[in-house]
C-alpha cells in the first residue's frame, strides 16, 4: 500500500537556562539567520496582494478566528499587556539563506532507503515564560512512498539524539541526512557510539550530544552551556513531538496494527507492536471518529489519531482532504499543538525551577530568589498560558481535550500547582518567622538602650544633687586633689552599683543579668577609687588634710558648714 500525500510537522520544546528569553532574542537578531515575523492579523491592517497571497491570508484568518480571544493573545500577540513588558510570544522565521530547500533522509535498515522532504517552514517561537519551541514543516516529495517507509520515517526523522546503540550502530536514527540550501549542501552520517557517548553537564543535569542535522537547524542556539551566555536545555526525550498527515486511496484497507503503529509513530512490522490485550479500547481512547465510517459514504474517511506526543491524520486522497483538511492540519491543529506543547514545556520548566538548588535550604538567598522568580513565572503562566478549552468549535474542543488528556497535562498541572503552593507557604512562613525574630531583636536592642539610659539617669541625678565641683589635679592642693577626685568618683559609682542591684531584683530574669553585671562592675570601681583616695589622703601632710576635707565637703555638699 502506497501513501499519496505525506507531511510531518515536528516540534522541539526547549527551556532557557543561564539567562532570559531576551538574551535568546538578542542572539537570534545578532546572528542574522533568523528574522522576527509577525502574524498578519496581529497588525492593525492587512494589505491584499495576489490571489495566492490572498488565499494564504484567508487560511491564516480562518485559523485565527477558530480560537477563543484569550488563546489569540497567546498565539498572535501584537502588543504587550497594558502596553508594558514583553509580548507573550515572539516568532522568528529562518531567513532565505538559512531555510533549507530540501532535506534528504537515508533511513536505517539492511536496505537503506532515501526519502526527500521539501521544507515548507522553519520557525522559532519564543515565549516570555522562558520556553522556546522550534517547528519544522516537512512535506515528502518521494513519489509512490510505501506505507512501511512512511511508518519508518515517523519513527526515525523525529529523533534528535541517539538514545541507544546496537553494537556500534545507533538505534532507530537515520543513517545519514543531507540538507540542500539555496547556495550550498551539507551532509552528515549518524553518530558512532564513541561520538554519541560525549555528554556535557548543565545545571539541569546531563545533556546528550545532538544529532548534527538538528544542531544545524537550531543554530545559532545551542544546548551546550557557554560562559555568561544563555543556552537551551532539552525538556523531553529523543523523540520530538510531531504531527503527521497521510492520504491513501482507501484508508479502510488499513488493519488494526497499521492504525496502532501510525498512532504511536512505531516502526513498521507484522502484527501489533504490543500484546493483543494491552489496548482493548483503542478506538475510544486514541481516535476521533467523528468523520470515520468505513461502511458509510465515501467522504466519511477521515480519522484523527492521538497519542500525546503524536497527532496523526489519515484521510482519503481527494480534493477536500488535500485543499481544506490539509490547511486545517497545518494551521488550526498545528496551532493547537503549539498551545499544548507550550503548556507542557512551561509546566516542566516550573517543576524544575521549584526543585531545590545549592544547599536546598530556605536560608540560602539564591534559592529564595529562584523560588520568587518561579512564582512570578507561575502567575504569568496562569494568566496567559493555561486555559481549559481552546475553541468554541465542537470538534476542536474534542481534539483539544483528548490530546491534552493523552499528554497528561491536567495531572502535571495539579502536581506543579500543589508544589508551588507548598513551597510558597514554607517560604512565606520562613520569612514571617525571620521578620518576627528581627522585630524581637529590635525590641531587645531598644530595651538595652533603655536600661543604659536608666542607669545614666540615676548617675546624673546623683551628681546633680551633690554637685560636680571637684578639684582637679594640678591645682594648689597637690596630691590631695587626686584624693578628692577619687572620693567623688567612688561615691558616684557606689551609688550606681546600689541602683544596679536594686534594678536587678526588680526586673525579669532575662534582664536582671545585665543590671547585676553592671552593679558588680561599678562596685569594683567604687571600691578601688575609694581605696586609692584613702591612701592618698593618709599619706598627705597633716596641715593639708583639713583643707582636703573642706574641699571634699565643698565638692559634695556645698551648703554644709566647714569640718571642725
Image (cartoon, rainbow, N blue to C red):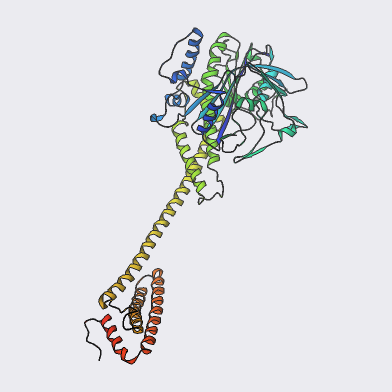
Q: Residue at x 53, y 12 (%)?
A: 324
Identity of the residue furthest to the top in this view: 51
Relative to residue 450, is residue 14 depicted above or below? above
Q: In this view, does 336 lie to the left or right of 112?
A: left
Relative to residue 276, is residue 55 depicted above or below? above
Who is closer to the viewer here, 187 or 489?
Answer: 489
Who is closer to the viewer here, 44 or 314?
Answer: 44
- Please identify the quadrant where the N terminus is shown: top right
Q: In this view, does 275 lie to the left or right of 226?
A: right
* Residue 277 screen position, x and y as percent: 67, 29
* Residue 35 screen position, x and y as percent: 53, 22
Q: Is residue 427 left or right of residue 547?
A: right
Q: How many labels does the image show?
A: 0
Q: Within the image, what quadrant is residue 559 found in?
A: bottom left
Q: Within the image, what quadrant is residue 279 found in?
A: top right
* Residue 475 screen position, x and y as percent: 32, 80
Q: Residue at x 46, y 47 (%)?
A: 425
Who is closer to the viewer here, 161 or 91?
Answer: 91
Q: Residue at x 77, y 20 (%)?
A: 111
Residue 402 seen in the current view? no
Residue 333 seen in the current view? yes
Relative to residue 226, is residue 525 depicted above or below? below
- Please identify the quadrant where the C terminus is shown: bottom left
* Residue 346 screen position, x and y as percent: 52, 34
Amino acid at each position: 500500500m502506497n501513501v499519496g500525500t505525506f507531511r510531518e510537522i515536528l516540534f522541539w520544546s526547549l527551556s532557557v537556562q543561564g539567562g532570559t528569553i531576551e538574551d535568546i532574542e538578542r542572539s537570534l537578531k545578532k546572528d542574522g539567520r533568523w528574522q522576527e515575523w509577525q502574524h498578519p492579523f496581529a497588525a492593525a491592517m492587512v494589505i491584499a496582494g495576489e490571489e495566492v497571497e490572498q488565499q494564504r491570508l484567508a487560511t491564516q484568518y480562518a485559523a485565527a478566528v477558530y480560537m477563543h480571544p484569550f488563546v489569540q493573545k497567546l498565539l498572535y500577540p501584537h502588543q504587550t499587556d497594558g502596553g508594558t513588558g514583553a509580548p507573550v510570544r515572539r516568532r522568528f522565521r529562518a531567513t532565505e539563506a538559512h531555510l533549507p530547500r530540501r532535506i534528504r533522509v537515508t533511513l536505517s535498515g539492511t536496505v537503506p532507503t532515501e526519502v526527500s522532504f521539501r521544507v515548507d517552514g522553519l520557525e522559532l517561537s519564543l515565549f516570555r515564560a522562558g520556553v522556546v519551541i522550534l517547528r519544522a514543516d516537512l512535506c515528502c516529495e518521494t513519489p509512490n512512498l510505501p506505507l512501511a517507509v512512511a511508518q519508518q520515517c515517523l519513527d526515525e526523522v523525529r529523533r534528535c539524539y541517539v538514545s541507544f546503540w546496537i553494537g556500534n550502530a545507533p538505534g532507530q536514527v537515520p543513517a545519514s541526512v543531507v540538507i540542500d540550501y539555496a547556495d550550498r549542501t551539507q551532509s552528515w552520517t549518524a553518530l558512532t557510539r564513541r561520538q554519541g557517548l560525549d555528554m556535557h553537564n548543565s545545571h539541569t543535569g546531563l545533556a546528550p550530544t545532538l544529532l548534527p542535522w538538528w544542531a544545524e537547524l537550531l543554530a545559532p542556539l545551542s544546548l551546550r552551556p557557554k560562559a555568561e551566555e544563555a543556552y537551551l536545555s532539552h525538556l523531553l526525550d529523543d523523540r520530538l513531538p510531531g504531527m503527521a498527515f497521510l492520504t491513501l486511496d482507501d484508508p479502510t484497507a488499513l488493519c488494526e496494527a497499521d492504525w496502532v503503529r501510525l498512532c504511536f509513530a512505531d516502526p513498521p512490522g507484522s502484527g501489533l507492536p504490543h500484546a493483543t490485550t494491552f489496548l482493548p479500547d483503542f478506538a475510544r481512547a486514541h481516535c476521533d471518529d467523528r468523520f470515520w465510517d468505513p461502511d458509510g459514504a465515501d467522504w466519511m474517511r477521515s480519522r484523527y489519531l492521538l497519542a500525546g506526543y503524536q497527532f496523526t491524520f489519515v484521510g482519503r486522497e481527494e480534493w477536500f482532504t488535500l485543499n481544506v483538511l490539509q490547511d486545517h492540519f497545518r494551521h488550526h491543529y498545528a496551532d493547537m499543538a503549539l498551545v499544548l506543547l507550550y503548556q507542557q514545556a512551561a509546566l516542566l520548566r516550573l517543576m524544575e525551577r521549584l526543585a531545590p538548588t545549592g544547599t536546598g535550604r530556605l536560608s540560602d538567598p539564591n534559592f529564595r530568589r529562584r523560588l520568587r522568580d518561579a512564582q512570578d513565572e507561575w502567575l504569568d503562566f496562569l494568566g496567559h498560558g493555561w486555559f481549559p478549552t481552546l475553541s468554541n468549535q465542537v470538534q476542536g474542543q474534542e481534539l483539544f481535550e483528548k490530546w491534552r488528556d493523552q499528554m497528561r497535562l491536567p495531572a502535571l498541572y495539579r502536581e506543579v500547582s500543589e508544589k508551588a503552593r507548598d513551597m510558597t507557604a514554607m517560604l512565606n512562613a520562613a520569612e514571617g518567622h525571620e521578620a518576627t525574630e528581627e522585630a524581637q531583636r529590635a525590641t531587645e536592642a531598644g530595651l538595652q538602650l533603655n536600661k543604659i539610659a536608666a542607669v545614666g539617669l540615676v548617675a546624673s541625678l546623683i551628681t546633680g544633687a551633690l554637685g560636680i565641683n571637684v578639684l582637679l589635679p594640678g591645682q594648689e592642693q597637690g596630691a590631695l586633689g587626686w584624693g578628692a577626685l577619687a572620693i567623688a568618683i567612688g561615691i558616684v559609682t557606689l551609688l550606681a552599683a546600689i541602683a544596679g542591684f536594686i534594678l536587678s531584683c526588680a526586673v525579669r530574669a532575662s534582664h536582671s543579668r545585665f543590671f547585676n553585671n553592671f552593679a558588680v562592675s561599678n562596685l569594683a570601681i567604687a571600691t578601688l577609687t575609694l581605696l586609692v583616695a584613702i591612701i592618698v589622703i593618709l599619706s598627705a601632710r597633716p596641715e593639708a588634710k583639713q583643707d582636703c576635707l573642706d574641699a571634699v565637703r565643698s565638692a559634695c555638699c556645698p551648703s554644709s558648714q566647714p569640718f571642725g
